[in-house]
Image (cartoon, grey):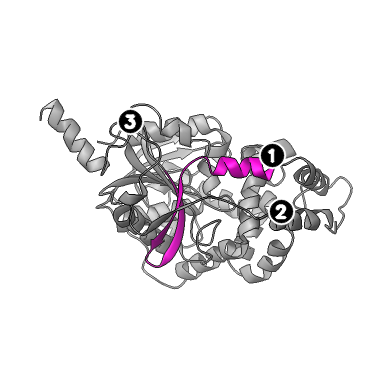
Amino acid sequence: MSKFLTLLFASLIWSTTICHSQTPKISTMKNTTTFKVSVPQPVLDDLKTRLKNTRWPGEAEGSGWNFGTNETYLKELVNYWINQYDWHKHEAELNKYPQYIADVNGVKVHFQYIKGEGKNSRPLLLTHGWPDSYYRFHKIIPLLTKGDQSFDLIIPSIPGFGFSEKTAISSEAVADLWKVLMTENLSYTKFYAAGGDVGMGVTKALASKYPGVVAGVHFTDIGYPMGQEDPSTMTDAEKQFAQFVQQWWYSEGAYAMVQATKPQSLAYGLNDSPTALAAWMLSFGNAGAPPEIVEKAFGGRDELLTNIMIYWTTQTIATSVKMYKIDAMAQWSGAKPLQKSDVPAGLAVFPREAQFPKEWAERFVNVTSFKKMKEGGHFAALEVPDVFADELRSFFYSID
């Protein structure tokens, strides 16, 4: 095949249009309207009042983070939130890139859509998790939309999170919506997908159910042993991983156990108190770690608060935690599990993430790249954006 025909063929596969602007034309999208973040001032005033009126429970001297989010640290964070954090500045940053609301099978889906500058940019769907949001990826947008090896980035908010419709649905149902969003609303014939945490489950379902349109997937985690596996089929490395997960579950897994069993009971307090909301999210971020590590896990203090603000201002903490219950009900209902996908999959294991072995990942996906990263944690796109962006570009551009 000639070089000209090769380039033409790649162009037809990977993009429905060649567009050098980072702002897609709304006329090329179906059932989609433009969107901007705009939080009314009364909501912000109410937030400050609630923060100032926090009833602090007190804590044992020297307890640190051993009983959950440290009160001394949280008081400092709340004081910063009241007196120094500038929401309007960060709201402007959220509006820096084009955003839209699409009607996807009757569900309102919020998403960012930024066209890459390369002539043959490849469409890449990025899915966040909990307790982060679409904001997880804001630092890698300029890194992945520049140069010849660029991407058209589609970064949606999962239903029940942030600015999407306030409804809780399963990870598999989200994957169904994403397929429609990409192929019908945005008219791509093929696309790549990446995700971690909840986004991992969504991306894994996409690859399993829609291999005809998903050309490659990337993960930073791949799920955990939950006692349903036959030990006789597990390697020594998998058994060690299972033991680690069991120990971690008893020491740090309270958030998931509560959200998967009593999300409604939890939601009342988190939706009513911004301090409680911050404390709950922080306890997941890196319990037992000093403040600088907790903040770094979310990309920094302002990034941490901006992520919390997205939940607070939209009142979506209730629907976000309910997703854990819905996924748990699906998992234990006896429904047939998803089939292992043949779609090429890349995995990057960051040092402050659960260290799953390659053979564990191979149970679920077609592992064509498996890397142990040197730095970063659960929110690698926020914490080490350069490293994460390089990993995505390297993997997805290695696929023909």
Q: Quadrant of the C terminus?
A: top left
Dot 3 or dot 2: first in sequence order is: 2
Vertical comparison of 270 with 395: above or below? below
Q: Nearer the viewer, mark 3 or mark 2?
A: 2
Q: Nearer the viewer, residue 222 or 158?
A: 158
Vertical comparison of 268 with 93: above or below? below
- Residue at 16% x, 32% y: name it: 6
Q: Nearer the viewer, residue 95 or 355?
A: 95
CA–CA distance between discs 3 and 2? 40 Å
Q: Amino acid at mark 2?
A: Leu
Q: Callout 2: few (<14), some (14-19), or many (20+) C-alpha neighbours within 10 Å?
A: some
Q: Identify the secondary structure beneath mark 3.
A: loop
In the drawing, does residue 14 fall left or right of residue 66?
left
Dot 3 or dot 1: first in sequence order is: 3
In the drawing, does residue 215 fall left or right of residue 22?
left
Q: Nearer the viewer, mark 3 or mark 1?
A: 3
Rendering quarter of residue 333: bottom left
Q: Check disc 1 and report the residue beneath it.
A: 301
Q: Which residues are magenta?
A: 86-113
Which mark, by number, is residue 44? 2
Q: Is residue 247 magenta?
A: no
Q: Check disc 3 and report the residue beneath it.
A: 118
**Furthest residue in direction bottom, as rendered:** 333
